[in-house]
Amino acid sequence: MFINFIYLAKSTKKTLLTLTLVCAITFLLVCSGTFFPYSSNPANPKPKRVFLQHMTRTFHDLEGNAVKRDSGVWINGFDYTGMSHITPHIPEINDSIRAHCEENAPLCGFPWYLPVHFLIRKNWYLPAPEVSPRNPAYFRLISKEQTPWDSIKLTFEATGPSHMSFYVRAHKGSTLSQWSLGNGTPVTSKGGDYFVFYSHGLEASAWQFWIEVQVSEEHPEGMVTVAIAAHYLSGEDKRSPQLDALKEKFPDWTFPSAWVCTYDLFVF
């Protein structure tokens, strides 16, 4: 349509010159900061929203052994500018610490609070010391049994803070047929993984639930990968010295939401 518009114009040369001039002026205005998209003005606030999650991740293999463990502040900026406007204020947040997807883990192996991984292509992972919540989360397999209809039923138990996320990825040759959550029918998020958000009051019993996996072809890597993230959104466990120090560096036109979390991945 744009090309057709140019050809329909009376003077193609003049039209191209005008469009080029408009683009050049717009580019200069953007570069000069005239079109800076954020503001801390109370009368017309336009904050940049950022999630800062200080986390420790632990990955387990099929035998239950911890094969990888790391810690850092996982950073998500929820708009098109990414961290481009933040880097001049916090130089350590730059493209050299772009987060890398864990290809064999659901949702790339990160503790997504919401299933928006397909909307946010870039995030950052700044190395930091391990977190040590006073009330750590626990996750365990209670039972593994074969059903009369030849599926495998895995029953789990989880305890932790008031907000947790559970992630599932069925391996090749396996299908998640049903579970004890919602209406009983598993629904994938975009990309094929499963996302469950769980919350409770300040006092709650252990969370017990089960999933059923239909296996048409067995693989030595197991039939399913699951992970659980514990989000500490209140109390002393929400904070860490590194998280507080990083948050203070953000300019006043940002709105960083910061909390501590843990992430544990298992294969069955």
Image (spheres, rainbow, N blue to C red):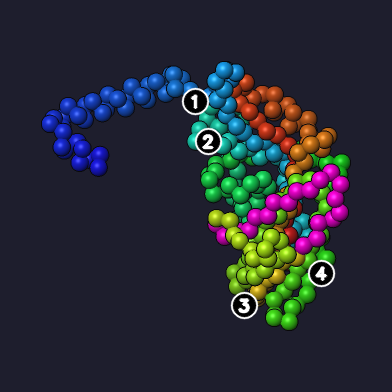
> Which residue is disc 1 drawn over?
37
Name the residue at 78% across, 71% down.
144
- Tell me the kind of residue under disc 3: Ser
Q: Foreground: 197 or 69?
A: 197
> Which residue is disc 3 drawn over?
216
Which quadrant does the C terminus fall into?
bottom right
Q: Are marks 1 and 3 in contact (CB under 8 Å)?
A: no
Name the residue at 21% across, 37% down.
5
- Tell me the kind of residue under disc 4: Ser
Q: CA distance from mark 3 to mark 2?
A: 42 Å
- Tell me the kind of residue under disc 2: Asp
Magenta residue check for 200? yes
Q: Are marks 3 and 2 in contact (CB under 8 Å)?
A: no
Q: CA distance from mark 1 to mark 4?
A: 53 Å
Q: Is residue 243 above or below residue 57?
A: above
Q: Foreground: 77 or 42?
A: 42
Q: Quadrant of residue 249?
A: top right
Magenta residue check for 171? no
Q: Is residue 223 visible?
A: no
Residue 212 place in picture, x, y as percent: 70, 70
Q: Secondary structure at mark 2?
A: loop
Q: Secondary structure at mark 3?
A: loop
Residue 243 place in picture, x, y as percent: 73, 32
Q: Are marks 1 and 2 in contact (CB under 8 Å)?
A: yes
Q: Are marks 4 and 2 in contact (CB under 8 Å)?
A: no
Q: Secondary structure at mark 4?
A: strand
> Which residue is disc 2 drawn over?
79
